[in-house]
Image (cartoon, coloured by chain):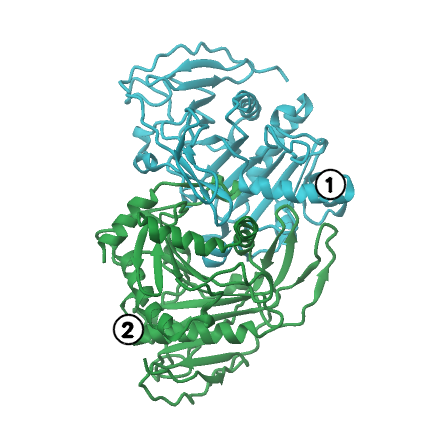
Chain colours: A green, B cyan
Amino acid sequence: MTPAPGPTRRTLADGRHIFYFDDAGTTHTRTARDLRELPSATIESQMRYDVLTGEWITMASHRMTRTHLPTTAECPLCPTTLAGAPTEIPEANYDVAVFENRFPSFAPAQDELLSANRFGPDDRRAVGHCEVMCFSSDHTASVGELPAERLRTIVGAWISRTEELSADPSVEQVFCFENRGEEIGVTLTHPHGQIYAYPYVTPRTQAILAQADKHFQSTGRSLLADVLAFERQDGARVVYAGEHWSAYVPAAARWPIEIHLAPHRDIPDLPSLNTEEREELAYVYQDLLRRIDSFYPGIDRVPYIAAWHQAPIRIDRHLGRLHLQLFSILRAPGKLKYLAGSESAMGAWISDTVPEAVATRLRELA
Amino acid sequence: MTPAPGPTRRTLADGRHIFYFDDAGTTHTRTARDLRELPSATIESQMRYDVLTGEWITMASHRMTRTHLPTTAECPLCPTTLAGAPTEIPEANYDVAVFENRFPSFAPAQDELLSANRFGPDDRRAVGHCEVMCFSSDHTASVGELPAERLRTIVGAWISRTEELSADPSVEQVFCFENRGEEIGVTLTHPHGQIYAYPYVTPRTQAILAQADKHFQSTGRSLLADVLAFERQDGARVVYAGEHWSAYVPAAARWPIEIHLAPHRDIPDLPSLNTEEREELAYVYQDLLRRIDSFYPGIDRVPYIAAWHQAPIRIDRHLGRLHLQLFSILRAPGKLKYLAGSESAMGAWISDTVPEAVATRLRELA
């Protein structure tokens, strides 16, 4: 595997950073300037502690005005060409481009207290980072159909950005993810993912860490490693069994289609992957996306969320363990799994599918 | 307030129970028989313990075949008339009718262990109850527009059903709620709510109980009572200030429109309400629904979830406190708040609205 070149760092007209990650074997100079007149955006995100649940809620009211399903001619994630208006990406083409979101939920700032909260930590500025990662110049592409080399570039970009964002002392956890599909509210159809660098450990991660701690206290072993070992041995829910990675439908899956992909080695995050693991990941990640896309006859693009769970940066790293949670809310052609009263108000999940049947179907699609 | 008559209990063709709650001052004999040939439904719900989060996931695969947005002529919640096919409700008209769901997520059964789980409690039958509560014979009605007397009947029906379901030793928590709107996946548009009687304490309730316990340990006081007292005194987020009830937008609201309604007296559940509290509740509940419905100019029916949080039946009743969580995912006309990667995968909530602005708008709509 030829190492891809490091990213080229440039700056957009309003001072935001953009990073170009190019496929191995290509040579590009990324020198195009952003010629827009773009005032700095005013970011007024704040976080408030929800005393009823013990969770932080981020309030980003400036996001109300963000771009919503623009036509292709107006897509801000397309490259900038002479034919159209300048976009967020000054180059005339790119392989993978990552830039700071103009409408971020978390933004670099002083960690400022805003108002007192007599029931818990005070309201504060939502400090952190939100980045957009574009996977292709081609507005109509999807990750499942990109050339193999591009998947390697994407893996490299996740690792590079996780490393850099983890070095910011205000960041507690880095989350690389892709939301795909208008059905889940994606406002831009151009193939892209996102990276959130949170100033706190997220609620699902906290729940997993608490469970992992209980398991460690009682067995001395890693919960996530033990679950992986059990699934590999049991086999009923396994979707992919590789040399360095395995994928399975979790026994208590909550989404209509849900796959967990985990490395065989105990590692906390994407930067800890070795060369062989990265190479296989570039293959299996795309393989799983293709299986999701072909899950329902007659549909070729299934909405999905691909979510990388990485260990927190500063606390409980020994309890965290890297894994991908890949899931879809499509429960049948034309039918979505909605979160209504039981899920949204009580957190009590009702699923219509059986994990073993979902795994059987996913295996058939090899 | 004339006391409404107690419910009339009848049985449907497949053995399920139906309860008619009639408005005070009316006299009906509810003797119509269900003449359908209706085989008993096979219910195979199970619950599995999700070891990653410590939560129960219920799997109800028989629900895949449930009725989905039928035409008015086929609505199973309309009364049975000579003109059409028989429905779930044998009477030719009704005020409020409650019956056992034919496709329940939780159903009465032996509490049976199904498979071993080496990482936590074993898989088990999803024992409990799921009931449907129809608010009106009128297919096109909405709760916000029903006559005042009907709201009293609805309050009485919630109380009566909560009392009876709480007496079942397999039930840990009773949840009365209404999902309204196709936008949140409601499959039947006839005005109706639901009641779930869970065999476990739900995750949100567990989170609230844990926070309330911490608060009680450090102050000796009730968290939910202290939050209510603070909101009433502060006033910035108050929507309704009555004699026995107050409503406010929570300081860390997670939904685009969210209101919490709480009684002034420390009580665990709906059956604990006294006569005056019931009377005011019938008024304020409808008042809040009307404010939600008129929140956005040009829209007269806003999708919402109305969720009654009642204390668990057997544990921690002193930490639970009755309140209604009323919320909408509509963040602007035609724009829904979707739960994408941050919320669905990480549990990290991002809101686009500011609670104080939402409260101001809701107050204006009085």
Task: In the displayed orientation, state which residue is furthest to the front.
Answer: A220
Point out the image quarter for the C terminus of chain B. Answer: top right
Q: Is residue B169 left or right of residue A138?
A: right
Marked residue chain, label 2: A
Q: Quadrant of residue B43?
A: top left
Q: Chain of mark 1?
A: B
Q: Position of residue A159 (x, y in %)?
A: 45, 73
SS at badge 1: helix
- Residue at the spot of label 1: B216
Q: Callout 1 environment at 10 Å: few (<14), some (14 to 19), or many (20+)?
A: some
Q: What is the number of the mark on residue A1?
A: none
User: Which label was assigned to residue A148?
Assistant: 2
Q: Name the foreground residue: B247 vs A218.
A: A218
Q: Residues within 10 Å of mark 2 (few under 14, many from 20)?
A: some
Work out how far the residue at label 1 is from the one at label 2, CA to CA, in angstroms: 57 Å
In the rendered image of this protein, does residue A203 appear above or below residue B90? below
Q: Secondary structure at mark 2?
A: helix
* A77 vs B280, nearest the viewer: A77
Residue A11 to residue B156: above or below: below
Question: Percent position (x, y) of residue A191?
Answer: 36, 68
Q: Residue at x 64, y 43 (%)?
A: B210
Q: Count the marks.
A: 2
Q: Compared to B350, does B244 lie above or below? A: above
Three-letter amino acid code at disc 2? Ala
Looking at the picture, how far across and down is residue B350, in whole percent? 54, 57
| Residue at figure coordinates x 44%, y 37% from the top left | B122
Q: Is residue A90 left or right of residue B217?
A: left
